[in-house]
Amino acid sequence: MNIIISNKIDKPIYQQINDQIKIQIIKGILKKDEALPGMRSLASDLKVSLITTKRAYKDLEEEGYIYTVPGKGSFVAPLNKDYVYEEALKKIEDYFEEVIIAARSINLSKNEILEILENLLES
């Protein structure tokens, strides 16, 4: 499993781990029922605290991306495509909300916002 931690972005390390594992599950790099590295092993490989990897795995389990078998470890859960779609849609809505707030702060019109979006979609 390939995970890259960056101190240059403003995101907690556990969230970076969480996000990268999610992406690998969604893209099919990590397959259903595939074993994930143990939390201690992952913490050691990434040179982070065990608490950090525990938090990432805990959140992934709560979100339905992984499951844990006591004494055996953590595994990739079957992917619920409807859940993934809804989660992505929510994230997009949140980004748009931030954009609208920023646009309103400089009095951009709806047409100006749409023009920016169209330009980005074309590039």
Image (spheres, helix red, strand yellow):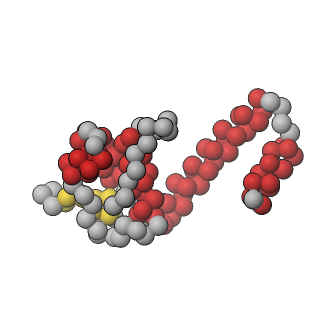
Q: Is residue 32 above or below residue 6?
A: below
Residue at image coords 42%, 54% = 20
- Please state, as top left, top right, bottom left or bottom right, where the N terminus lies in the image: bottom left
91, 8: nearer the viewer:
8
User: In the rendered view, does 41 fall on the left or right side of 58?
Assistant: left
Position of residue 83 measured from the top left corner of the image (x, y, whole percent)? 48, 60
Residue at image coords 26%, 39% = 49
User: In the rendered view, does 4 fall on the left or right side of 100?
Assistant: left
Quarter of the view holding residue 94? top right
Position of residue 15 measured from the top left corner of the image (x, y, whole percent)? 41, 44
Q: Is residue 16 above or below residue 27?
A: above
49, 51: nearer the viewer:
49
Res. 115 in view: yes
- Please state, as top left, top right, bottom left or bottom right, where the C terminus lies in the image: bottom right
Residue at image coords 87%, 46% = 111
51, 65: nearer the viewer:
51
Position of residue 95 measured from the top left corner of the image (x, y, whole percent)? 63, 44
Residue at image coords 77%, 51% = 117
The outermost residue toward the top is 105
Position of residue 5 measured from the top left corner of the image (x, y, whole percent)? 40, 45
Label count reads: 0
Res. 54 in view: no
The outermost residue toward the left is 71
User: In the rendered view, does 89 fall on the left or right side of 32?
Assistant: right
Quarter of the view holding residue 22? bottom left
